[in-house]
Each structure stands twice: as C-alpha cells, then as structure tokens.
Amino acid sequence: MARSLVERTLASVTHTLEQTLFAEDIARQPGVLQSLDPRVKLVSVLALLLAVSFARNLWVIAGLYLLVLSLAWVSRVPLGFFVRHVWVALPFFTGLVALPVLFNVVTPGAPVLTLWSNPLIAITAQGLRAAAFLILRVGTSVSLAILLVLVTPWNTLLRALSVLRVPSVFLLILGMTYRYIYLLLKTASDMFEARQSRVVGRLQPAAQRHLVTNTMGVLMSKSYGLSQDVYLAMLSRGYRGRPRTLDRFTMQPRDWLWGAAALSVAVVALWLGRG
C-alpha cells in the first residue's frame, strides 16, 4: 500500500535521526581511532588525503583504500554500513563524470570494446584506466572523510579544526548548525507523529500538502524564536564572541606514534605513486 506524504516525511525524518544517533554511538566505541587525540586524527587524515590526491599509481590508491577499511574495522565501524554509505551514492555523482572518459571520443587509445563501427565509438583501455583512477580516488577520499567523522564526535572535531587556524566564529556556526538541525528534525518528527495520531483514515492530497506547508511555517517560526533565546542564553553565561568548551586536548605517546606512522605512510605512498 502506498504511503501518504505525511507518512513518508515522518519516515524520512526518523531515519535521519536514527543515522545521527548511530554515528554518535560509533564515536563513543572503544576503538583504535576513537582513543586518539582528535588533532592527530585530523592531521593524519589530511596527510593521507594528500597522498591519495597526488598518487599516480592505481595500486597505491587501492592499497590506501584497504588501509582505510582496516582502520574502520579496528575502530569498530560496521564495514557494511561504512562501504554502503560511500559506494551507494558515489556512482550517481562520480560515475556520471567518469562515464564520458571511457569512450575514444574523449580519451583516445586502444579500443577494448567497440560499440559502434561507423563512426568508431569504443571504450578504450586508457579511458578505463582514467575512470578507475577517478572513481577509486574519490571513493578513497570520501571514505577517509567519513571515517574521521564517524570516529570523532562532531563538537570535538570542530574544536580540533582550530589547529588549522580555522576562525572560531566559523566553528561556532558549524557546531550550532549541526546541533539545532538535529533539534529541529526532532521537533518536526514530534509534530508529524502527533498529527498522525489524531487522524482517522487517510488525508486527501490537498490536506496533506496543507499540513506539510503549515509544519514548515511553524518550524521556521520556532527556529527564529529559538535562535533569539539561545543567543540571549549565551550572553547571560558569559559569551563575548569566542566559544569556550570543556574539552582539553592532551597528547599521549600513542598519539605521537600514530601521527608519525600516518605521516610515514603518506610519504611512502607519495613516493611509490610517482608514476
């Protein structure tokens, strides 16, 4: 049976909330990466991203991707969840960009599969290699970024960005945006669920659209009022333009060892991937 617009919206909001809570649970697991200083994790991931970006050897990039999978496994990240989140959406974006590269019209070379003889339209070996480079490079880079986010609480990761001299105001905006998007999603879910519990039968399409637009208006009003209340609450607690957190980062010997090992892997990958 086809679900109504309200039911689909409620299911979508609920799924988003579940994914957010699941990611927070992973960040609190006693895994290898979770135990490291977030600044070390950030710098290590940036070094590996540079290695992936500049490597010109396909096997080196594949080896770095296997390293990412190994890190996810020892950090207790479910591999099925991890791989699915990267490779399910990737073909719809990178695949569309890589598709024209396969053909001799864009990438001349030795034909591997001829699709049309006059004029010649074929998939070339050079095109396959270029597409494989693009897809694997993007997939490995996205995997590194997702792994960093999964094993580090969002607020802690934002605090760690200060090591890159990111403006504190920008970090504050990102942190509050994440927190209050979650809060507004929870509010929207509660509103839709309350409305559904008071409906007998199925609403007409016009009534469903009217309900959704009314909910959007109420959420906009709530978000504006909430922003004013939060700002006044921050001022009353001493906010003067610079955010303060309770996190205190302390480098341990394992953090230094991990950072040195990650940088060494990145340097070796860059050296092996020169040609």
Image (cartoon, rainbow, N blue to C red):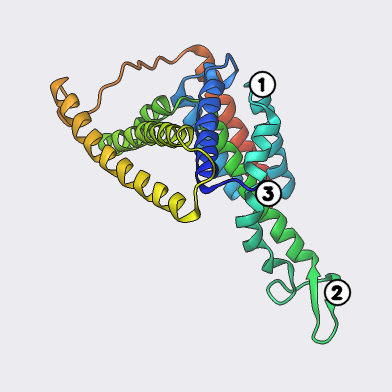
Distance from the alpha carbon under mark 2 to that under mark 1: 44 Å
Q: Are marks 2 and 1 in contact (CB under 8 Å)?
A: no
**Left or right of 40, for residue 230:** left
- At mark 2, the secondary structure is strand
Q: Which residue is mark 3?
A: 136
- Residue extending farthest to the front is 200
- Give the percent coordinates (x, y) of residue 50: 54, 43
- Asked where in the image residue 238 lies, by quadrant, the reply is top left
Residue at left 26%, top 42%? 221
Q: Decide which of 68, 10 is in the foreground and name it.
A: 10
Q: Which mark is residue 74?
A: 1
Distance from Cα at disc 3 to Cα at disc 2:
25 Å
Residue 198 point in image, percent of width and height: 45, 34
Residue 72 vs residue 271, the one in the foreground: 72
Residue 69 x/y as whole percent: 68, 32
Can residue 153 be seen from the camera position used here? Answer: yes
First-in-chain label (1 vs 3): 1
* Mark linked to residue 114: 2
Q: Nearer the viewer, residue 47 or 187?
A: 187
